[in-house]
Image (cartoon, helix red, strand yellow):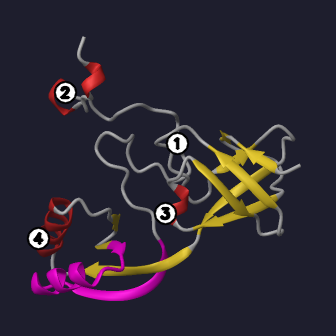
Amino acid sequence: MMLTLHTKIPHADAIAAQLVLPYELREKCRLRAMLDTGEEVAVFTVRGTVLRDGDLLTGEDQRVVRVIAAPEPTYKVTCANAHALLRCAFHLGNRHTQAQVGDGFLRIRADEVLKEMLAGLGASVVEEMAAFEPESGAYGGGHGHHHDHGQGPLAPIPLRQKIHRPGDLK
């Protein structure tokens, strides 16, 4: 029977295996994957959950698996000063691009069009294989890493920003 992981836990005394995944797979709520031990697992999380590097998962058999952010093709964006880096962050956000915010740098997924735009803004854009941990967004509970405390949104979500579907009208 396949191991099923469905619960995040804050700590564990022993880790049975590691689950190494790129960001694209860590944001899926249903996933089949392979542990570093070669064992196949099924991962079921609540929709909207993002698995972060260092998260611990468990299931019915109580084994604990640590999530590891896999290195993937990214661009590290740096600038001569904070103002120029802020301009780059603004333009990336304006294009709804996921970005990791580091100390004096931004990291994005490799994309040639964005690389050209950033270079045009005066940024240094360097290709690198790195773990990608983008910000979760203003209403996503902040940048969790592995210290998620189950907090809700950082601020109340204004009614006009809620998504309405045709069936919502009553």
Q: Residues within 10 Å of mark 3 (few under 14, many from 20)?
A: few
Q: Residue furthest top?
A: 170
**Residue 83 badge:** 4
Q: For the C terminus, which image quadrant? A: top left
Highlighted range, magenta: 107-131
Q: Residue at x 15, y 28 (%)?
A: 160
Camera-nearest residue between 14 and 72: 72
Q: Amino acid at mark 4?
A: His
Residue located beneath label 1 in the image: 148
Q: Residue at x 14, y 67 (%)?
A: 91
Q: Choose mark 3 or mark 1, whichever is in front.
A: 3
Secondary element under disc 4, as helix, strand or loop, is helix
**Residue 97 badge:** none
Residue located beneath label 2 in the image: 158
Secondary element under disc 3, as helix, strand or loop, is helix
Counting residues from the start of the chain, the first of labels 2 and 1 encountered is 1
State the CA–CA distance, disc 2 to disc 4: 30 Å
Q: Amino acid at mark 3?
A: Glu
